[in-house]
Amino acid sequence: MSISSDRRPAAVSWLYLAICVVLVSLNLRTLFSSFSAILPEIVAATGLPGWGATLLTTIPATLLGVFAPLAPILARRFGTWQVLFGALVLLTLGLVVRSLPGPDGGAMVPLLAGTVVSGVAIALSNVVLPSIVKQDFAEHLGLMSGLYTTAICGSAALGAGLTFPVYQQLPNWHWALGIWAIPVAVAAALLVPIILRHRSAAQVSTSTTGRSPLTSPVAWHITLMMICQAMTSFTCFAWLAPMLRERGIDGGSAGVIVAVSIVLQMAGSLLGPVWAARLRSQSVLNAAAALLTAGGFVLALHGPLAGIWLWTGVLGIGQGALTALALTMIALRSSTAHMAIRVSGMMQGLGYGLGSSGTFITGQIFATTGSFGPAAWLFVASGLGAVIFGWLAGRNRTIER
């Protein structure tokens, strides 16, 4: 393992770097799941309109796509670890701002501002992490891909499962959201030794010379797979708890069900990349994960309520594996770290940018019909797309420089 392309770090161990990657990843989804966990309480306390709730659940995922192409440019100028550190500082600031009271007691201004800042920070982090794994953990690619994607799922589980109980113990919803800035600040502090002792650490050439991933069918298959999985993934983070509450499940129980589902995502995201790295073709694995995801979501909406733990469990395992496999395709199909970060920027830029439409469409379906039920057709369509493009992306081919 090397922290730069030509030398090993003398003062920072492989284990320390791995711990940092995992702890950073544990903070990359609480923005989404913490808000949705107490959305009814925020609406009741502030009178937040329906369009405002839809906007606040859609913007973060959209920003992941809009700002993803900026990450390779910043990485070329400053280095991947430095970009990651800056993103965590920005995320800390955004989460604090999101929790502040607004003018005249309103909530929309700080919620929107904090969400935008946080979304930009997560977009940058998302793109540089696969490149760091490709370059600095090349000998443990499957394991590290599984660990960091599992930690991302764990982040969503923490936000979904703990925010409502924390809200019940604290004075108001502002504290319940603001508390999530603390672990982000801790993760940023842990990166300081890397930044200070290795100022040129982890710089990855992101020169625009060489083949563009935009000309590669393989890169497009990965990107389209990402779009389809993101349509379900962020809808799950934003709306699954309200969907369960619409079916008559109380807020506390809904939070626990979502948290358990996301914990099972962790199992899928850990095992998926490990299996994928051992196979020449990942087509069957990708297609199976997509079928489990779509089936679980549709059953969570329309299946017998007595089986809700099973349906959300199937959704969790499938979604965790599908998300992790989509991200693992970046490293498995890229010939170099140089190409990996460019593919990552393309795949996550378009994937999250277009995939966030699932969150918006689901919100609009609810606003128009008063029910989440019709959204099942959206998950059938996105699941079918994930099966097709996951199969194509999983074929044993490489994106050359």
Image (cartoon, rainbow, N blue to C red):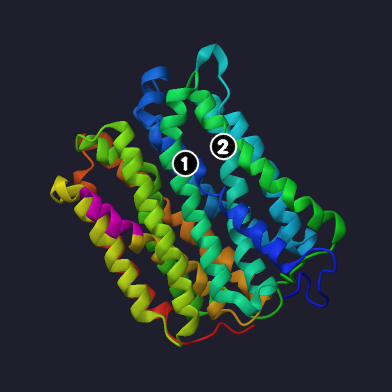
The residue under the point 46% across, 54% down is: 153
**Residue 170 place in picture, x, y as percent:** 49, 22
Residue drawn at (38%, 24%) of the image = 41
Q: Residues within 10 Å of mark 2 (few under 14, many from 20)?
A: many
269 relative position to 138: left or right: left
289 horizontally vs 98: left or right? left
Q: Main secondary structure of the magenta part?
A: helix
Q: Is residue 152 above or below residue 339?
A: above
At a point 24% along the width and 50% down the height, the residue shown is 309
Quarter of the figure with the C terminus? bottom right
- Tell me how far mark 1 sits from mark 2, CA to CA: 8 Å
Q: Earlier in the sequence, mark 1 or mark 2?
A: 1
Q: Position of residue 334 (x, y in %)?
A: 58, 79
Q: Quadrant of residue 399?
A: bottom right
Residue occupied by mark 2: 180
Which residue, given by chain and number where applicable, does mark 1 sit on? Answer: 159
Task: Describe the element under mark 2 as helix, strand or loop.
Answer: loop
Verify whether residue 68 appears in magenta: no
Nearer-the-camera pick, 357 or 268: 268
Magenta stretch?
Answer: 308-316
